[in-house]
Image (cartoon, helix red, strand yellow):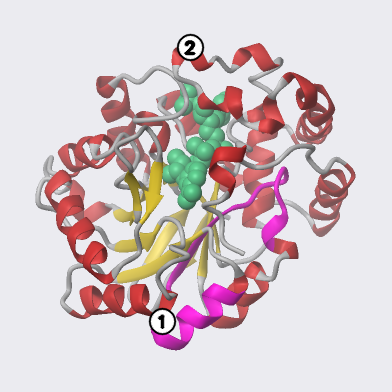
Amino acid sequence: MTKTVQIDAHTTVPVPGFGAMGMSAFYGQINDDESKATLRKAIEIGCTCWDTSSMYGWGHNEKIIGEVLKEGDNRKKVFLISKFGLKQDGKGGMVVDGSPQNVIDALEQSIKDLGGLYPDAYLLHRVDKNVPIEETVRALDALRKEGKTKYIGLSECSAATLRRASKEAQIDFVEVEYSPFELVMERNGVLEACRELGVKVLAYSPLGRGFLTGRYKKPEDFSLASGDYRAAFPRYTKENFDRNYKIVEELERLASKKGCKSGQLALAWLMAQGDIIIPIPGTKSEKYLLENFAAREINLSAEEVAEIRKVCEENAPVGDRYPESAMHTLDG
Ligand SMILES: NC(=O)c1ccc[n+]([C@@H]2O[C@H](COP(=O)([O-])OP(=O)(O)OC[C@H]3O[C@@H](n4cnc5c(N)ncnc54)[C@H](OP(=O)(O)O)[C@@H]3O)[C@@H](O)[C@H]2O)c1
């Protein structure tokens, strides 16, 4: 049985979706021709729920997506999510800006970068601790009422923030890190609040930033010199890599029993967590796109789902989710 998630009475999206971040930032070398070929292939195979952000290459990601979506009738085929709120501070760092004026300005900029196209969903990338969430959400809801986006949401919010936001307007999406490698949203009340409020969950880094695929076998496989920022993420440093690798071995063991790859097992497991979960694995290559999207053909029994959960719980990761410099941007 292939899988979809129903967003509302009008819209259903295929799962897994697709995350385009690595095509512009954070995970090493980029190649626009290869990325655009992968995006076209995603449309061809029906992997059409895409996630981007204004901060992925500061406009670069939206630009390559816009170029592909403007080809033929591609725009009609894709459900496009973009995000805003993270800005360059001019000193090599980032600031969060959830002010109502920035909601308007950022969407104008995203539309420009997308070549005049509008995103279907527009999400606050990080919660601005200096702006009450109600103000940001009112501004987002106003854009929705003007028809500049159809759906709105928050990324990396706490359950308390989501509940406050939902009193102001219907929140359609929450984007959070969620994978067998990161179950924090099951423990901090976010998943429970999403279920209760009818909010769909965009599960980001569903492959543990690639770690769960078994492709990266030692910390040196992530190199800052070639633009791979995972080298600075505590979970993949020398101190923690080997201890964290146990979960990869365990998933590989279960995947070989099932006749699939460990990354596919991770995605199938996430999709089995409920019909509100949309994993958005990211890749630059057609090869991995095909592999990831094929995870929708894998059906897990209740026993298999429980077995994978046991592996996750017995191999909880060591090290923070983000480098220290980015931890302050997380809510709650
Ligand atoms: N809201 C947020 O704060 C936030 C944060 C992070 C990510 N996101 C979103 O979530 C999306 C996915 O997260 P992510 O990219 O961080 O992590 P991910 O999907 O867990 O992993 C991506 C990494 O895994 C590799 N990969 C993908 N499929 C593979 C396969 N089948 N076999 C081997 N390697 C594979 C990719 O390599 P290649 O690129 O070389 O193909 C890439 O390096 C992003 O693209 C972005 O849209 C959102």
Q: Which residues are magenta?
A: 160-185
Residue contact between numbered discs 2 and 1, judged by CB atoms under 8 Å: no
Disc 1 crowd, CA 10 A, few/some/many (<14, 14-19, 20+): some
Can residue 319 be seen here? Answer: yes
Residue occupying the point 63% across, 68% down: 190
Q: Residues within 10 Å of mark 2 (few under 14, many from 20)?
A: few
- Residue drawn at (68%, 26%), measured in percent from left and top? 236
Quarter holding the C terminus is bottom right
Tell me the quarter of the image containing the N terminus.
bottom right
* Residue shown at 45% from the left, 49% from the top: 17
> Is residue 281 in sight in this rendering?
no
Q: Compare residues 296 and 68 and report the one nearer the observer.
A: 68
Amino acid type at circle 2 is: Ala
Asked if 246 appears above or below 114 in the picture, the reply is above
Residue 283 in percent (x, y) is at: 45, 31
Q: Secondary structure at mark 2?
A: helix
Along the polypeptide, which appears first: circle 2 or circle 1?
A: 1
Instruction: Decide: is 36 above or below 298.
Output: above
- Which quadrant of the view contains residue 91? top left
Residue 329 locus on image (x, y percent)? 52, 52
For the image, the number of numbered tags is 2
Q: Give the residue at mark 2.
A: 225
Amino acid, disc 1: Gln
Give the label on residue 191, or none: none
What is the distance, in whole Å, between disc 2 and disc 1 at their CAs? Answer: 43 Å
> With 39 as the anchor, is 75 left or right in this view?
left
Q: At which x and y percent is residue 68?
A: 19, 38
Residue 312 located left or right of residue 159: right
Check disc 1 and report the residue beneath it: 170
Q: Residue furthest front?
A: 91
Q: Measured from the top left, where is residue 35 in percent x and y?
A: 31, 27
